[in-house]
Amino acid sequence: MQETFNSLIKRSLNIKQSTVGDPFECIPIKNAKNAKNCIEIHLSDKELQEVINFDKFPNLECLWLNNNKFERLDGLETNFRLRELYLHKNKLKTIEGSIPNLLHLRTLTLAHNEIRDLDKNLEILQKFKQLVQLDLSENPVAEEPNYRIRVINAIPSVQVLDRHVVTLEERAKAKEWYLAEVKGIQPPKKAKKTSAWQASQSEINLDKEAKSIKEKYAGQKAEQEEKEKGEIETRFKRWYTTNIPTATFLLENRAKLQALPITEWEKNYLMPIFKSYDKEKKGIIKFADAQAFYNDLIDDKGCIGLAPNSSFEEFCTALKINSDKDNTITWNDFRIRINDLKWTKADAKKTKERIDSYYKEANKLIFMGKGTQAPDLLHKATRLENALSK
């Protein structure tokens, strides 16, 4: 897309576009080492008519030269390691030049060109023993009689021709065509099967009786299946027309969950703060860290838009943690006991400032090429925006 856009800009500014393709344009550091290690080059949509410097890219395996203006392709004689070559939508009149040297090709697309004389081109292509995918559609050669059969016969390795899979039936037809047209051998006519054996009258009667028994059995089986189907439908209707009671336990818990000041989803965002004070990695927080943990919740470090509406003493009382004996609390206990705390919306002004700072920091990371770090900041910003809108 970017290359197409650049091409349009050059045309609008009357900048003459080069017709010579150089693979060094496609690598960031233009030296011999990078050229030698390069295995794929894209030079599409550039109005190219010739290429240079491909001898510096000996390990090239895939080359895109489609949507250009090549009439003949030269300059790839040393790139015998090429496995994929895309030349569709050019002005090629022949496949002579560099292509006959690329005997290891597995994919060759030549659609939408001006290639003529199928026999002449098949003499070249039949040497490509590893060719699996070939596209010659929208060329004059594709209009020649028995085109597809001739190509399949000349290149047995091809599995996909003109974007259609080669079938076993087509291969059989190609073989018949070759024997008839090239070798002059007509396929033998299939003899009509004649049977010397004739059934006796008793055998005919037994066959009729067997058929009648089979039909009778099939009818009984169908009746039985229909009967079972009717019974299932009856049970189904009886089941779903009955009022199924909902467990009182489920109704009570559903009501409790709806009445909670903080949702289970919001509690999940408090877990990273809890873990930051779990220095021994035992899933607990000590009383010594409770004050700092409380301050983080007041500052809404979890970005949930809520903060405890209670003093530190009330906070410790609700969590059942103190400086004497119960001086630790686990995450599971904390998750349950914070339901007894009073919660309120975090300060709106500070929340808006944090939203702006998160968006600015995310944009800065994206601009610096560190976009993978931005989603976390963007998620925090959107969570706070949703909390403000409630």
Image (cartoon, rainbow, N blue to C red):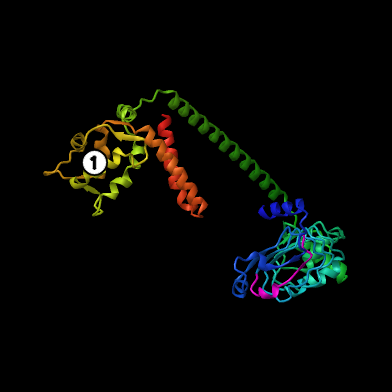
Quickly name the residue at label 1: 333
Q: Residue furthest left?
A: 324
Rendered-image quadrant of the C terminus: top left
Residue 304 placed where, x, y %? Answer: 37, 37
Q: Nearer the viewer, residue 189 or 69?
A: 69
Mark 1 residue type? Asp
Q: How many marks?
A: 1
Q: Is residue 201 magenta?
A: no
Indicate left or right for 359 with 340 as reference. right
- Secondary structure of the residue carrying numbered label 1: helix
Residue 232 placed where, x, y %? Answer: 48, 31
Image quarter of residue 255: top left
Image quarter of residue 89: bottom right
Q: Nearer the viewer, residue 250 or 385?
A: 385
Query: Would residue 310 be visible to someone looking at this image?
Result: yes
Q: Nearer the viewer, residue 126 or 209?
A: 126
For disc 1, the neighbor class at 10 Å (few under 14, some 14 to 19, many from 20) is: few
Indicate left or right for 328 with 1 as reference. left
Residue 63 placed where, x, y %? Answer: 69, 65
Q: Is residue 57 magenta?
A: yes
Indicate left or right for 2 with 51 as reference. left
- Main SS type for the magenta part? loop
Query: Would residue 187 be visible to someone looking at this image?
Result: no
* Region rendered in magenta: 47-60
Residue 15 placed where, x, y %? Answer: 76, 57
Image quarter of residue 209: top right
